[in-house]
Amino acid sequence: MKKHRWIVKIGSALLTNDGKGLDKPAIADWVAQIAELKKQNIEVILVSSGAIAEGMKRLGWETRPTDIHQLQAAAAVGQMGLVQTYESLFSKHNIHTAQVLLTHDSLANTEQSSNISATLNALLEMGTVPIVNENDTIATEEIKFGDNDTLAALVANLVGANQLVILTDQGGVYDADPRQNADAKLIDKIHVDDEKLKQVAGRTGGSLGSGGMYTKVLAARTAAKTSTNTIIASGKTDDVLTRLHVGEVIGTLIKC
């Protein structure tokens, strides 16, 4: 049976329980779902935010710093907790993980991006789950992706993924901002080139993350360049990944 490839991106607000440290029960649930996907012949690359937020928690910082070197330091501290958590939780399912830290420069460089692609392919063939994050400790403002939505889409391009799943703390893309308009309706399916996408996607993110719905829509457009469909859905939905696999309509499907 031919294997499918999914890129699953989980944002900071979900992973860190909105800044209260890593939400290990929630992470354990997503890990269990990914383990089930692997049993169904789906190769998964996990693009995980959360390093800076976890570092802030460990360092006792309540406000996200603006200084790039403080952000880099927080990322270095938080990355340790993030990787430890994933490694321990996936090991319960007899799955090895691999840490892959990338920068914009590394993906923009043809030779380096080719090497990254080969390494990710090798890791998938070995049955591991690569955990991808931006290498915040060496990235500067000029070369930062700005959010892991963009990174996830670029990784999808790199490995020819069938589907990009962006898990967020919102239900998907709405026809108005649901935080301000109680009558906002969820868009369950839309084409990537539909102008409505640009109109309804907000440009602002939460205090912990740097990507709003706008960056997720842009990521879907980037993923579409290699014929990858994108689903934006709430990570708080029970069994969201396994239910998406069996065809349930959850969140917003952005078709290419």
Image (spheres, grey):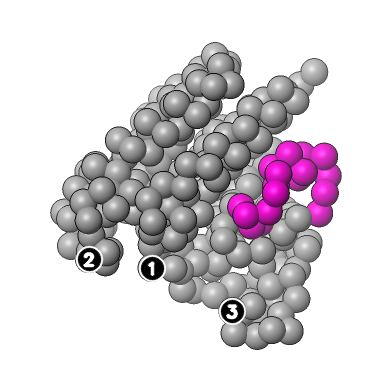
Residue range in magenta is 233-249
Q: Mark on residue 38?
A: none
Q: Residue at x 73, y 84 (%)?
A: 183
**In the image, farthest residue toward the top:** 126
Q: Badge 1: how crowded within 10 Å, few (<14), some, or many (20+)?
A: some
Q: Earlier in the sequence, mark 3 or mark 2?
A: 2
Mark 3 residue crowding within 10 angstroms, few (<14) / some (14–19) / many (20+)? few
Give the CA distance from mark 1 to mark 3: 15 Å
The one nearer the camera, 209 or 228, is 209
In the image, residue 93 above or below residue 56? above
Query: Element under label 3?
Result: loop
**Disc number lying in front (1 or 2):** 1
The local crowd at label 2, few if under 14, some if 14 to 19, many if 20 or more residues have their Cα within 10 Å, is few
- 77 horizontally vs 184: left or right: left
Which residue appears at 71% of the width and 22% of the height?
A: 39
Foreground of the two, 249 or 155: 249
Q: Amino acid at mark 3?
A: Arg
Give x and y (percent) for residue 182. 69, 84
Q: Which residue is mark 1?
A: 207
Asked if residue 238 is among those painted magenta in the image, a careful observer would answer: yes
Q: Which residue is mark 3?
A: 179
Q: Find residue 66 and name its label.
A: 2
Q: What is the x, y in percent for residue 77?
A: 24, 42
Please tell me which residue is depicted at 22% across the width and 64% down the height of the picture: 65
Could you say which is closer to the camera, residue 157 or residue 173? 173
Q: Are marks 1 and 3 in contact (CB under 8 Å)?
A: no
Label 2 residue SS: loop
Whole-number angstrom distance, CA of label 3 to CA of label 2: 26 Å
Q: Position of residue 91 (x, y in %)?
A: 50, 21
Q: Nearer the viewer, residue 224 or 182?
A: 182
Locate the N terminus and report the quarter of the image it occupies: top right
